[in-house]
Amino acid sequence: MLNPLSIVILAAGKGSRMKSPKAKVLHEICGREMLYYSIKAALEITDDVIVVVAHQRDAVIAAMEKYFNNLTFVTQDAENFPGTGGAMMGIKPKYDDVLVLNGDMPLIERTSIEKFLANPADIVMSVISLENPSGYGRVVIENDRVQRIVEEKDASASEKAIHTVNAGVYAFKHHVLQTYIPRLSNANAQGEYYLTDVIEMARRDGLEISPLFVEEVEFKGVNSKNDLTNAEMIMMDRLRRTWMDAGVIMQLPETIYLEEGVTFEGECLIENGVRLCGNTQIINSHIKAHSVIEDSIVKNSDVGPLAHLRPLSVLEDTHVGNFVEVKKSTLKGVKAGHLSYLGDATIDSGTNIGAGTITCNYDGVKKYQTIIGKNVFVGSDSQLVAPVEICDNVMIAAGTTVTAGKYESDLLILSRTPIRKVAGFFSKFFGKGKEC
């Protein structure tokens, strides 16, 4: 059920501490940009989500429009009105209750956002109690009301002993923003407009400002590559737990890499060290240790160990063994036991792919298709030079190079250079004294 709430997500910053040319909110966690997760949580609650952009504006908008089509984007005039207060200038929310989130908080969840709605105060301010608050501004709370925010450099000894700090998420009544955002000033050392100044002005005018204690794990922002890694570990643990609760068996789950777009159906077993990426679908299948699957569909099949399915591969009723690589191919009812590359191929049921088989799909300029019918036996160390079509019920002898063309049913395809025997060559080359 959606709520009459407008959510503004601040995603305009550069994120200089990430030490990257990429906008901070575009750094990925479990296969999706971190901003995606803030938006996803917001859209579970409301139909009015406003994303404030500035740095790499077009890239941020394009990235989010891959997933969502019901967002409002507002471009901050960051040159003239920098800062979190500047980001709120020109915002036109649909509802009277306005929640301000940060785009670098990918771990926030719907249930935590909903807690802001239960408080009728003019301003609800998220706060965290830290064991070591050093480096953070302290939030002074008296009689369950926020009195002020004190920067550490300005705090007295008694204020520095406070463990409550600002978590950076706020719920405002719209009239509060209408009143105080136009009154913000950038007369400070950084020359920025701060949203926290609204808290101070509202307090002086006697408005009700309530603290909401929240969990650090959800509200801590991602400001560095180290933060990014820590957030990804937490997110991945959530994903693994969700799918295990849904019935997926994961062996040594902490070793399994799992992305947001991956889905499972039916009885699935995932062994240790597996990496599942993109929009992969695993259906009633067994993925063996240290296999990698990217943007592929695996149904009623087993893969690995140490196999690699590259994007746009589809396996159904198929066995793919160790050191087999499949790329943009469809295999239905196929056995490919080991040591093969199958790219840009369609292979039908009953076909066996011998060890060392390669589809030669690329001539240096273009990619070509290999089509293999039913009940084809491909001998070990064979090369299939695309474009090539092998019809049903064909045997390809080991070591054969099948050149481009179409091969009809009921054939033996054989290509071998005759063996040449040179008597006495070994002893001549190595010398008569060398032992075998």
Image (tube, rainbow, N blue to C red):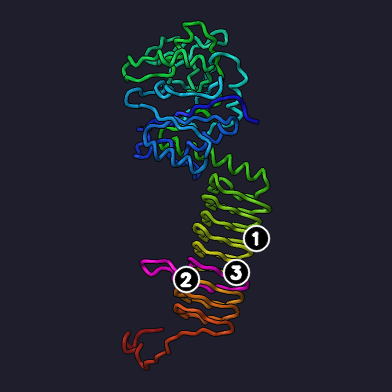
Give the prevailing secondary structure in the magenta stretch. Answer: loop
Q: Which structural element holds mark 3?
A: loop
* For residue 203, above or below residue 234: above
Q: Residue at x 51, y 60 (%)?
A: 308
Q: Amino acid at mark 2?
A: Thr
Q: Which mark is residue 359?
A: 2
Q: Quadrant of residue 320?
A: bottom right
According to the picture, the residue beneath numbered tag 3 turns out to be 334
Q: Which mark is residue 300?
A: 1
Closer to us: 6 or 307: 6
Q: Tell me residue 333's x, y (percent).
A: 62, 68
Indicate which disc, 1 or 3, sits on the residue closer to the N terminus: 1
Q: Residue at x 59, y 53 (%)?
A: 281
Q: Tell me residue 58's x, y (percent).
A: 39, 39
Left or right placement of residue 201 versus residue 348 in this view: left
* For residue 197, above or below residue 67: above
Q: Tell me residue 380's x, y (percent).
A: 51, 76
Q: Tell me residue 100's x, y (percent).
A: 50, 24
Q: How many marks?
A: 3
Q: Residue at x 58, y 57 (%)?
A: 297
Q: Which mark is residue 168?
A: none
Q: Amino acid at mark 3?
A: Val
Indicate which disc, 2 or 1, sits on the residue closer to the N terminus: 1
3D distance between C-alphas at marks 1 and 3:
12 Å
Q: Amino acid at mark 1?
A: Asn
* Res. 427 visible in picture: yes
Range of the magenta residues? 341-368
Quick one: label 3, few (<14), some, or many (20+) residues within 10 Å?
many
